[in-house]
């Protein structure tokens, strides 16, 4: 399924987070009566956190109650996710979910929870492409040129990522498999951008939010975005699918709640919700 | 772009399957 993405890339379904929890419709209509928490399983300052904070501000304005962002980090997002799994299904603890949660289903074999089973999906928020960027030292200006260069230099090009099993990693592995090239994965816990800027790694799949300033400053060269259509943020950059048919990778975000949150309340709330678009500064 | 909770749930399952195949094919294991 393809997630739409829009100019400036943030799209918040504001009612989404409002939805949760309680056995009675009347209760749902009065929700929330006290502050709620949105658990972000990644550090402050990352895209996930930024989206949660924009959503929290929007919900405060719409509903009159604070939605406090709590960053519970670690284990690739699993610590924060598990804290929501264990929380009371009362609508006052929500989870900012994303592609990392779906990846972790396969990546981690010994979790104490099952994300698909234990987190109730409430609503999607937004989807956004990643962008494939190279250090300017790479003599490739298009995807076909990069593929040819990589095949001529097999095993000599380093691909940075945010870590093993991160979104940037799996997007890169998908590209490697679909093009038959051999890139050396170099995971980084502290962020791959410094290594990419210095040339220690030569290619990466990164968020537009992270890479945009470097692309604009000609410090990194964007070759393609990972969605099937071009991004309105980078309209001159082609999509990978223009050269690698069927390649598609979208980062996406949404809201989840503990599994026993009554679905009828979520459904009624979804119907009442109004999509809200937020433009990031 | 908003999905209902049901549609979002199906989407998550599809994404887990899609990227699970990549993880298995690339032999990616958690640290």
Image: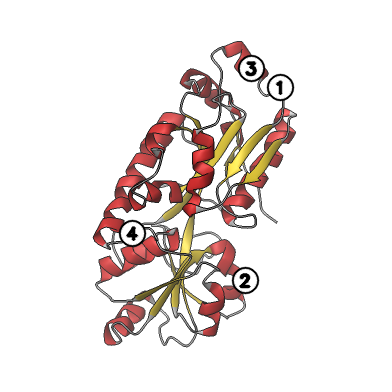
Q: Could you say which disc has been placed on residue A33 in the image?
A: 1
Q: Could you say which disc has been placed on residue A29 in the image?
A: 3
Where does residue B3 sit, x and y in percent of width and height? 46, 35
Q: Is residue A57 above or below residue A240?
A: above
Task: Using the numbered discs, state the Cα–Cα distance from disc 2 to disc 1 in whole angstroms.
Answer: 41 Å
Task: Using the numbered discs, state the Cα–Cα distance from disc 3 to disc 4 in whole angstroms.
Answer: 44 Å
Is the N terminus of chain A in the top left, top right, bottom left or bottom right quadrant? Answer: top left
Q: Could you say which disc has been placed on residue A160 in the image?
A: none
Q: Could you say which disc has been placed on residue B29 in the image?
A: 4
Where does residue A26 sit, x and y in percent of width and height? 62, 11
Q: Mark 2 = which residue? A: A213
Q: Is residue A238 above or below residue B7?
A: below
Residue at the (26%, 66%) spot, across then down: A178
Q: Which of the two discs, 3 and 4, sits closer to the camera?
A: 4
Q: Which of the two discs, 2 and 1, sits closer to the camera?
A: 1
Query: Does residue A273 appear anywhere in the picture?
Result: yes
Tell me which numbered mark, 3 or 2, is placed earlier along the sequence: 3
- Can marks 3 and 2 be said to lie on one chain? yes
Where does residue A200 sit, x and y in percent of width and height? 48, 83
* Mark 2 nearby-residue class (10 Å; few <14, some 14–19, many ≥20): few
Q: SS at mark 2?
A: helix
Task: Using the numbered discs, state the Cα–Cα distance from disc 4 to disc 2 in whole angstroms.
Answer: 32 Å
Task: Using the numbered discs, state the Cα–Cα distance from disc 4 to disc 1 in whole angstroms.
Answer: 43 Å
Residue at the (36%, 57%) spot, across then down: A248
Residue at the (56%, 33%) spot, across then down: A16
- Can marks 4 and 1 be said to lie on one chain? no
The residue marked by circle 1 belongs to what chain? A
Q: Which of the two discs, 4 and 2, sits closer to the camera?
A: 4
Task: Using the numbered discs, state the Cα–Cα distance from disc 3 to disc 2 in whole angstroms.
Answer: 43 Å
Residue at the (37%, 66%) spot, across then down: A172
* Mark 3 nearby-residue class (10 Å; few <14, some 14–19, many ≥20): some
């Amino acid at each position: 399924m393809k997630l739409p993405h829009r100019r400036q890339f943030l799209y918040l379904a504001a009612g989404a987070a409002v939805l949760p929890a309680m056995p009675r419709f009347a209760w749902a209509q009065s929700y929330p009566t006290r502050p709620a928490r949105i658990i972000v399983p990644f550090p402050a300052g990352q895209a996930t956190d930024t989206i949660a904070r924009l959503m929290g501000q929007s919900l405060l304005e719409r509903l009159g109650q604070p939605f406090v962002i709590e960053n519970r980090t670690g284990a690739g997002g699993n610590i924060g996710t598990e804290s929501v799994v264990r929380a009371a299904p009362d609508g006052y603890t929500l989870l900012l979910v994303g592609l990392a949660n779906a990846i972790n289903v396969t990546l981690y074999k010994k979790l104490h929870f099952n994300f698909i089973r234990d987190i109730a999906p409430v609503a999607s928020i937004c989807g956004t492409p990643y962008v494939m960027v190279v250090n300017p030292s790479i003599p490739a200006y298009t995807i076909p040129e990069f593929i040819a260069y990589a095949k001529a230099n097999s095993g000599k090009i380093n691909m940075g990522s945010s870590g093993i099993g991160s979104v940037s990693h799996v997007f890169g592995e998908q590209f490697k498999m679909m093009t038959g090239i051999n890139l050396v994965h170099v995971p980084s816990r502290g962020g791959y951008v410094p290594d990419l800027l210095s040339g220690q790694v030569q290619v990466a799949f990164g968020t537009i939010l992270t890479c945009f300033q470097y692309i604009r400053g000609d410090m990194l060269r964007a070759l393609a975005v990972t969605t099937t259509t071009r991004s309105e943020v980078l309209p001159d950059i082609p999509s990978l699918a223009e050269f690698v048919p069927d390649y598609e990778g979208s980062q996406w975000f949404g809201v989840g709640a503990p599994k026993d949150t009554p679905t009828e309340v979520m459904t009624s709330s979804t119907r009442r919700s109004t999509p809200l678009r937020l433009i990031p500064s | 772009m908003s999905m209902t909770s049901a549609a979002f749930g199906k989407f998550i399952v599809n994404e887990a399957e899609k990227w699970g195949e990549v993880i298995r094919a690339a032999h990616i294991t958690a640290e």
